[in-house]
Amino acid sequence: GENVEQHPSTLSVQEGDSAVIKCTYSDSASNYFPWYKQELGKRPQLIIDIRSNVGEKKDQRIAVTLNKTAKHFSLHITETQPEDSAVYFCAARSAGRRALTFGSGTRLQVQP
Amino acid sequence: DTGVSQDPRHKITKRGQNVTFRCDPISEHNRLYWYRQTLGQGPEFLTYFQNEAQLEKSRLLSDRFSAERPKGSFSTLEIQRTEQGDSAMYLCASSVERAGEAFFGQGTRLTVV
């Protein structure tokens, strides 16, 4: 089955700096890659997603890049703000399946 | 609130007891998922419904676990003979189509003592 590795497990940046979180996946048939943000005690919320027919997608301060050949994808947050502090999860879904396979999460702390 | 609703939010039970959780998806969503999340980990897939049909089950879903979605609307997840290892957050999610965004509920936090 699919396996998703996520790095780093914790990331601390100064307010205004950029943050990058990286994930790799194992199943070359995976074609959907969402990123979720989970604040303490709250539900995971989708912040951006990308499909395998696209190499990059951007939404304001957030961008995701996908390298299908290397089977890795990354989340980029620019101009970080304290409210970006949360745990971020990457996920992948294989074609023909319904389940998302999640990474183990990255705890991002933005220092004011 | 028109999001995914889960009940109860918290459940403490003694080992060996049965528990049942409920999930009400977003009304027009015909796809419903159950995930389990332990501290410091990402959600792990348990099972998936399309309307009332349970189409996919994870190996994590042992024979002590059963899920239903009898009318294609709300779903229940039952755990029989609970064990301490069942302590986790149980998350429900729904989506309107397979390729669509999955919206998560707040979860039910189960503690088995």
Image (cartoon, coloured by chain):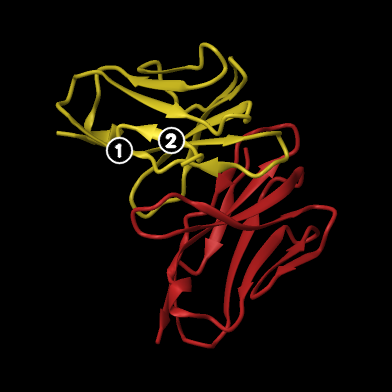
Q: Is residue A49 left or right of residue B64?
A: right
The amino acid on which the numbered mark 1 sits, given as a three-letter code, is: Arg
Secondary element at tag 1: loop
* Residue B90 in picture, x, y percent from top left: 38, 36
Q: Chain of mark 2?
A: B
* Residue B75 in picture, x, y percent from top left: 47, 22
Task: Kindly indicate whether the residues beneath marks 2 and 1 are on one polypeptide chain.
Answer: yes
The circle on residue B5 is: 2
Specify the quadrant that holds the C terminus of chain B. top left
The circle on residue B9 is: 1
Label 2 crowding class (10 Å Cα cut-off): few <14, some 14-19, many 20+?
A: many
Q: Which of the 4 image quadrants contains residue A30?
A: top right
Marks 2 and 1 sit apart, C-alpha to C-alpha, by 9 Å
* Residue A11 in picture, x, y percent from top left: 45, 75
Q: Which of the 4 image quadrants contains residue B40?
A: bottom left
Chain letter, red in picture: A
Q: Which of the 4 image quadrants contains residue B31?
A: top right
Q: Is residue A21 left or right of residue B75?
A: right
Q: Chain of mark 1?
A: B
The amino acid on which the numbered mark 2 sits, given as a three-letter code, is: Ser
Q: Nearer the viewer, residue B103 or A105?
A: B103
Residue A91 higher or lower than B24, as above or below: below
Residue A14 higher or lower than B110, as above or below: below
Label 1 crowding class (10 Å Cα cut-off): few <14, some 14-19, many 20+?
A: some
The circle on residue B22 is: none
Determine the colour of chain B.
yellow
- Residue beneath the point at 63% across and 73% down: A76
